[in-house]
């Protein structure tokens, strides 16, 4: 029956049928004009909108499937070309994670993290070149950048997380990190992808992330154009319950950001492999004669080809050690020790099997700077004590503290001799032997 608001039910029954239909149609029109039937309109609009909704879902699914497929192709290429990319150093490798992850998963590749000593000088004894053809059964994959430090390395290792579980890797330490209260080189080695993946990943516990975030916030220039990451790092660093709740609530947005960065990284890797990759060197076994190699690079001249000129004994007695107190004060105040412990905690959390190599202090340089050997000894002692707490292997090359042929003077860069000693330690470590000093 039509609505009875216009006529009574009794009166309605007495109206002829044709008039009843006409009266019902007028009533419905009047009610529609008064918005009395919104459900009828919604259903009609809903039926009209359903095809558009399904079309959007189908289009989104096709795009997602296409991106996933391209990503899988890129991952396959990253792993299948590891023999070509492992020894190389290029910006995408150090700023992204795709090539680092491929190296971490390759059984015959030893990742090596360090600073500018992995890049310059380009001597043939450098590990990435020396092991390019896998003469002892493995290649070295270097990841180094000028100014890199423990803080930048731990973000990359924490970002890769489970990829390093049970994996051998090597960390090259520069003594200079521990002689300054603040290491400015971190700004140039910062990686947005590594920082985001570390912060929003699940490899590290909340307490370790909090301590890392506190250090990262001390370098605000790296976060100037990354407001979301900065905001989330502040939530991590505060330690307050409310901030922790906010971090957890916004964590899905962080995962979305890292997913987008990962896709961009894989597409960039795909482009690099397609257009810039170099042919892989043919691998062959040729075990090196370490004593012969060491003998061939040992000499009495400095790395710069100059003879060592020591101060006279009388001069040494009066001046050497005059700046010991200043040296110890700067070393004890350095945040490098904090960053190194954060790195050791990160290596423990991801269950990696690391070897730490420390270049020796340039003793000849510090002798001329009036810093005695006994003062420099405090660096080696403190380094050993810290690393031993985490039960990791360490070779500090302390015996070459005053070896002028081990380092380039005034620089923390290895000479041919220094690299031969490094390479022997890498070979021992990879094959399960105790690294020799």
Image (tube, rainbow, N blue to C red):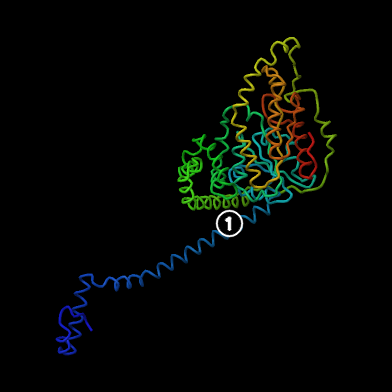
In depth, the one of 221 and 125 nearer the eye is: 221
Q: Quadrant of residue 65?
A: bottom right
Q: Is residue 319 above or below residue 382?
A: above
Q: Quadrant of residue 425?
A: top right
In depth, the one of 181 and 257 nearer the eye is: 181
Q: Is residue 46 above or below residue 253?
A: below
305 lies left or right of 221: right
Q: Quadrant of residue 171?
A: top right
Q: Residue at x 58, y 37 (%)?
A: 189
Q: Residue at x 62, y 19 (%)?
A: 326
Residue that carries the numbered disc 1 in the rendered image: 71
State the residue lying farthest toward the front. Answer: 241
Crowd class of label 1 (few under 14; some 14 to 19; many from 20; radius 10 Å)? many
260 lies left or right of 294: left
Residue 346: image x %, image y %?
A: 62, 43
Quarter holding the C terminus? Answer: top right
Q: Secondary structure at mark 1?
A: helix
Residue 57: image x %, image y %?
A: 45, 65
Q: How many marks?
A: 1
Residue 421: image x %, image y %?
A: 77, 34
In depth, the one of 379 and 171 nearer the eye is: 379
Quarter holding the N terminus? Answer: bottom left
Residue 68: image x %, image y %?
A: 56, 59
Q: Is residue 243 above or below residue 370?
A: below
Q: Is residue 218 above or below residue 351?
A: above
């Amino acid at each position: 029956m039509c609505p009875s608001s216009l006529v009574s039910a009794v009166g309605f029954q007495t109206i002829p049928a044709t008039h009843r239909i006409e009266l019902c149609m007028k009533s419905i029109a009047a009610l529609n004009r008064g918005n009395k039937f919104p459900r009828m309109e919604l259903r009609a609009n809903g039926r009209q909108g359903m095809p558009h909704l399904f079309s959007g879902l189908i289009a989104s699914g096709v795009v997602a499937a296409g991106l996933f497929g391209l990503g899988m192709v890129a991952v396959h290429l990253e792993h299948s070309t590891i023999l070509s990319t492992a020894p190389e150093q290029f910006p995408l490798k150090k700023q992204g994670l795709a090539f680092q992850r491929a190296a971490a998963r390759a059984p015959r590749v030893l990742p090596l993290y360090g600073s500018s000593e992995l890049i310059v000088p380009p001597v043939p004894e450098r590990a990435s070149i020396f092991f390019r053809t896998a003469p002892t059964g493995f290649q070295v994959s270097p990841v180094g950048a000028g100014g890199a430090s423990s803080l930048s390395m731990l973000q990359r290792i924490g970002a890769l997380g489970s990829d390093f579980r049970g994996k051998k890797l090597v960390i090259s330490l520069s003594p200079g990190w521990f002689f300054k209260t603040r290491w400015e080189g971190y700004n140039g080695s910062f990686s947005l992808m590594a920082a985001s993946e570390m912060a929003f990943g699940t490899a590290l516990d909340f307490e370790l992330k909090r301590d890392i975030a506190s250090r990262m916030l001390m370098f605000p220039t790296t976060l100037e154009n990354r407001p979301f990451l900065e905001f989330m790092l502040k939530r991590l660093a505060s330690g307050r319950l409310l901030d922790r709740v906010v971090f957890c609530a916004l964590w899905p947005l962080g995962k979305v950001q890292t997913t987008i960065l990962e896709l961009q990284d894989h597409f960039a890797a795909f482009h690099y492999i397609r257009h810039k990759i170099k042919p892989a060197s043919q691998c062959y076994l040729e075990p090196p004669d370490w004593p012969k190699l060491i003998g061939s690079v040992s000499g009495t001249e400095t790395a710069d080809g100059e003879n060592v000129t020591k101060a006279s004994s009388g001069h040494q007695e009066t001046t050497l050690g005059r700046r010991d107190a200043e040296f110890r004060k700067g070393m004890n105040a350095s945040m490098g020790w904090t960053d190194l412990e954060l790195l050791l905690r990160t290596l423990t959390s991801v269950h990696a099997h690391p070897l730490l190599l420390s270049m020796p202090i340039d003793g000849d340089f510090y002798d001329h700077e009036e810093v005695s050997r006994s003062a420099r000894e405090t660096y080696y002692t403190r380094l050993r004590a810290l690393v031993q707490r985490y039960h990791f292997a360490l070779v500090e090359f302390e015996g070459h503290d005053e070896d002028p042929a081990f380092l380039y003077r005034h620089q923390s860069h290895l000479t041919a001799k220094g690299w031969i000693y490094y390479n022997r330690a890498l070979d021992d470590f990879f094959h399960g032997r105790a690294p020799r000093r």
